[in-house]
Amino acid sequence: MKALNKETAKKTVRPERIIQFGEGNFLRAFVDWIIYNMNEKADFNSSVVVVQPIEKGMIDMLNAQDCLYHVNLQGLDKGETVNSLTMIDVISRALNPYSQFEEFMKLAEQPEMRFVISNTTEAGIAFDPSCKLENAPASSYPGKLTQLLYHRYKTFQGDMSKGLIIFPCELIFLNGHKLKETIYQYIELWNLGDDFKQWFEKACGVYATLVDRIVPGFPRKDIAAIKEKLQYDDNMVVQAEIFHLWVIEAPQEVAAEFPADKAGLNVLFVPSEAPYHERKVTLLNGPHTVLSPVAYLSGINIVRDACQHPVVGKFIHKVMFEELMETLNLPKAELEKFAHDVLERFNNPFVDHQVTSIMLNSFPKYQTRDLPGLKTYLERKGKLPEGLVLGLAAIITYYKGGVRADGAEIVPNDAQEIMDLLKQLWATGDTAKVTEGVLGATFIWGEDLNLIPGLAEAVKKNLDSIQEKGMLETVKAIL
């Protein structure tokens, strides 16, 4: 078996046009895979310089392989099972700004540089007032980026053609807006002046993005077989699902510079990210939150098995297509395609997604993912969505704890305040009190859900049915 490096494998040399803050599994299986496809299919002709955003990271491992590695895509694509391996060659080099600060700053001096992409975790886009311009480097990611932008501005004497296009991929809503605000805070803190501020405003663009791909990461259990198949000793293999979506809130002239659509990729440039964020939360996360307690209390442990179950599968379909989809405002055909993609993801034969792993903090999840849909459905249809109501009753029942019919333990996990409330309410043995108490918990919902017409009555009816007939029979009654 060969070592993996540019001596043993082909590595194309391309102009360095992208600075990437982050070397983790997600960026390598998502952004760098996308750039690889753009190079191959759309003549993008660009390579990436990776910057390690924190002092300790994986760039030494990357550099040891000349930044070559394989992406292993697994899942269903239009019903066909896929398990592919692709060598990604787009990273030219990887830097640690804590030990290579000068090299890091020199990136700003390269005239061909055009894009900055980041994924520094949700906590990465934060303002740290202790950062100084003269730090080598600033501790925060926005601080490092401001250092780089200011150096570029000075190097090219405010040349408007030398601005950068910035795509943050951190998992926070309107990440671009937050990053831009934070850069402004550093411009003010460090007194960088109005001329630089205007250059940043006019020459650079910071755009909100939504990213979506499940990336399990390094395939520990499969790695020996993968290395055998590749005949390379690749220690940076990253496993990911087939599905990918990148929504970028930017004008068409930015899309023209980043021609992902020409490579047949699921990258959308849109005027507003908001409806796509709402679509993901509603049609992917929303069904997850209610299918999990319904499945577990029906004796099912894996998401895929729940989708394929003759009763629970119909429940999931009802919640997605007949209830939650009816609350969204994007074109119906687009929503249906996304929902079918979600079902393929849920059915991924390579991922045993435990429903109990989704059950963590179910009440706050229901509040953000399902409650808005319940209200909109009621408003539009004049009646409550039966599947979403049953999902709430299933969560309340799951939080009672105890054991399942097959003897498996039911172990709820949430904020102590929520756990204590459910324990007290279930101790009464009165489902009316349980319902009223949960719906009236304003510290969970930010309001009293007892005021939603018919909700308390419907939830109590479901709780009683689950206690008397069991979960499966209760589900059958609404199908």
Image (spheres, rainbow, N blue to C red):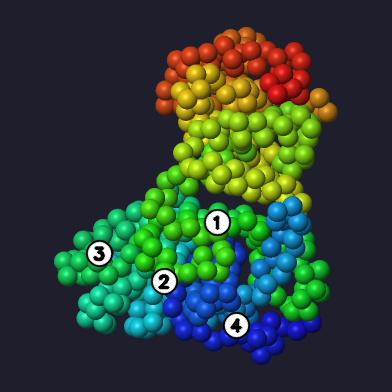
Front one among 404 and 240: 240
- Say which element carries label 2: helix
User: Which numbered disc, 2 or 3, marks the residue that appears first in the sequence?
Assistant: 3
Is residue 2 in sight in this rendering? yes
Front one among 463 and 455: 455
Residue bearing the label numbered 1: 245
Residue bearing the label numbered 2: 257
User: Which numbered disc, 3 or 1, marks the residue that appears first in the sequence?
Assistant: 3
Residue bearing the label numbered 3: 201
Question: Which label sits in the foreground, 2 or 3?
Answer: 2
Relative to residue 228, is residue 10 drawn left or right?
left
Q: CA distance from mark 4 to mark 1?
A: 28 Å
Give the vertical position of 46 relative to 185 (above or below).
Answer: below
- Say which element carries label 4: loop
Q: CA distance from mark 3 to mark 1?
A: 28 Å
Q: Residue at x 30, y 77 (%)?
A: 162
